[in-house]
Image: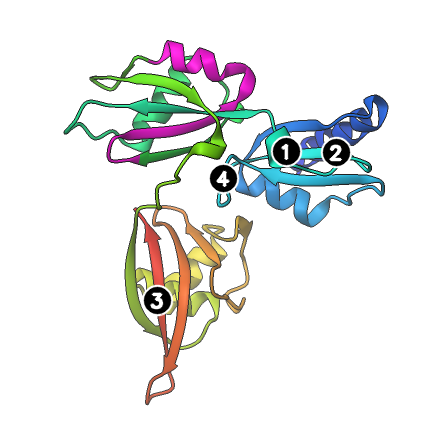
Amino acid sequence: MNITDAKLLTAKTEDLFDLCEKYAEPKFSQFLDGGEIAVIEDDFRIPYGFNTMFFGGYERAERKIFGVFPEWQQARTEDFPLLAIRFEVPKFRRLTHRDYLGALMSLGIDRSKTGDILVDEEGAYVFAESDIAEYIARSVNKISTSGVKGRVIEPAVITVPPPRTVEKKCVCASLRLDAVLSAALGISRAAAETLIRGGSVKVNHRAASDRSKQVSENDLLSVRGSGRFILKETGNITGKGRLHITVEKFV
């Protein structure tokens, strides 16, 4: 995120606290992506006298709404202004995340009004702000070349499908960022360093420019052009002093 966008996000976040204090009621942002969430977590100082929470409809959501609550009110997920739309597609027809996102964008809906899109074998769940959920369910009746049916449901009743990932076991010299990238992507350390120096790598949605940065289990690594993966597990040391690791790549 550039400096201008970060300043605008900070100003909007400050407004949430001002409005919460003025009206003595919870106030909520629109959906934020991982980079925006990182800015608030890392750079924004939460004023005294408020309760706050991020929530995107389920526990491991990537896109989340930031909620600001008065000091006397507990932050609760059920107070967040979001719903889910369940889309069902004909049997033997598989649509992708991009297909669903394209259908939403064709309605002229800003991406900040919608959250994660969870695709499974029979359709998808789309999280959205409460005030547009019914509109989305009514308006989207065809995605790609498939007819679809949408209905609005409460997030609490959803059984979240597991993410689609591929597991890879490999060995690396250490848990330095360049070493982990080299092993996970099957490239040289020099190539990994080039990616890092070129600004193509993020760790937990934060830009990573230091090749010697230590990576920990459950860290999310994003590489422009190569996708995302999680360092799922670190294992034993080999006889040559290298480290066994398991990474989980999103597909």
Quadrant in which the N terminus appears? top right
The single residue placed furthest to the front in the displayed view is: 157
Q: Between tags 1 and 3, which lies in front?
A: 3
Q: Earlier in the sequence, mark 1 or mark 3?
A: 1
Q: Which residue is mark 2?
A: 69
| 202 with respect to 148 (left or right) | right
Mark 3 and mark 4: Cα distance apart in space: 26 Å
Q: Between tags 4 and 1, which lies in front?
A: 4
Q: Which residue is mark 1?
A: 5
Q: Which residue is mark 3?
A: 246
Q: Is residue 41 magenta?
A: no
The three-letter code of the residue at mark 1 reads Asp
- Give neighbour class at mark 2: few <14, some 14-19, many 20+ (Cα, 10 Å): many
Mark 1 and mark 2: Cα distance apart in space: 24 Å
Mark 1 and mark 3: Cα distance apart in space: 35 Å
- Which region of the structure is painted magenta? 120-140
Quadrant in the picture for residue 135: top left
- Decide which of 42, 173 is in the foreground and name it: 42
Q: Residue at x 41, y 72 (%)?
A: 234
Mark 2 and mark 3: Cα distance apart in space: 40 Å
Q: Earlier in the sequence, mark 3 or mark 4?
A: 4
Q: Which residue is mark 4?
A: 58
The three-letter code of the residue at mark 3 reads Thr
- Label 2: which secondary element: strand
